[in-house]
């Protein structure tokens, strides 16, 4: 195969998706405990290759799955709960989050239009990006013994320092919550992994960070007082 080929990655992801719980129907992450730190570094190297590499065989079908496979790799690399070992690996290299964010956006901009399941992949993309943008905060929670990768924490009760409030990621996260809200308004799809978890982090930002309070208040109002009741009544579909 040519040096710039990424067929090996495409087939690796397709083969391991179900094993590592990366399908939309599977939430069993028990296999993550078998991955070593070196395994995570190999996944990171794959993430770097996917946006720029080329496909030479089965071009149409490989291109159709290229973004979803990129999302699968990022999810696998960032799967830090409820597995303490994988969380420790991820936090150890948390500084790679900004690079992964850029690589994922390159892949999204280049390959989203080719995806067959556009709604699903867009919702998943928003989930993954918001997770990436919370990395610096979870690094803070970890360093200050609020979180160890296994137990659940109520982030709404943990004051955030100024450097988190003023971080670029904190500013960016507003944009992706807005995109999620617009997506749900248009599609009637409830993004459970945003509205039932990360929304608490949005509330923490609203509570402890002085900037953009009104914007965050309006977004929280839509999610908590509109989307969540609609979902409970069956008026919104699952992602």
Image (spheres, rainbow, N blue to C red):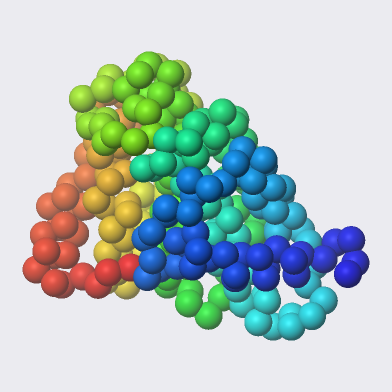
Q: Name the side, left or right, on which 100 lies relative to 2.
A: left
Q: Position of residue 206 (x, y in %)?
A: 26, 31
Question: Which quadrant holds residue 215?
Answer: top left
Residue 169 visible in image: no
Question: Which quadrant holds residue 162?
Answer: top left
For the N terminus, which image quadrant? Answer: bottom right
Q: Position of residue 29 (x, y in %)?
A: 42, 54
Residue 207 visible in image: yes
Q: Position of residue 57 (x, y in %)?
A: 79, 80
Question: Which quadrant holds residue 27?
Answer: bottom left
For the C terminus, which image quadrant? Answer: bottom left
Q: Residue furthest front?
A: 34
Q: Is residue 226 shown above or below 85?
A: below
The residue drawn where x is 70% and y is 53% is 46
Report the front residue among 104 and 91. Answer: 91
Q: Position of residue 115 (x, y in %)?
A: 56, 75
């Amino acid at each position: 195969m040519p040096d710039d080929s990424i067929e090996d990655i495409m087939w690796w992801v397709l083969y391991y998706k179900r094993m590592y719980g990366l399908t939309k129907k599977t939430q069993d992450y028990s296999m993550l405990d078998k991955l070593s730190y070196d395994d995570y570094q190999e996944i990171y190297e794959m993430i770097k290759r996917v946006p720029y590499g080329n496909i030479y065989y089965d071009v149409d079908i490989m291109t159709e799955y290229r973004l979803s496979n990129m999302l699968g790799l990022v999810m696998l690399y960032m799967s830090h709960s409820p597995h303490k070992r994988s969380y420790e690996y991820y936090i150890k290299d948390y500084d790679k989050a900004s690079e992964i964010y850029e690589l994922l956006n390159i892949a999204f901009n280049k390959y989203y239009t080719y995806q067959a399941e556009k709604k699903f992949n867009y919702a998943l993309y928003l989930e993954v990006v918001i997770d990436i943008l919370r990395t610096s905060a979870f690094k803070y929670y970890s360093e200050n013994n609020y979180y160890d990768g296994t137990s659940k924490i109520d982030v709404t009760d943990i004051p955030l320092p100024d450097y988190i409030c003023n971080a670029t990621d904190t500013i960016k996260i507003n944009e992706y919550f807005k995109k999620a809200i617009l997506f749900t308004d248009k599609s009637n799809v409830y993004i459970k992994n945003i509205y039932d978890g990360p929304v608490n982090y949005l509330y923490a930002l609203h509570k402890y960070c002085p900037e953009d309070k009104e914007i965050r208040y309006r977004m929280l109002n839509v999610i908590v007082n509109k989307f969540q009741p609609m979902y409970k009544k069956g008026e919104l579909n699952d992602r």
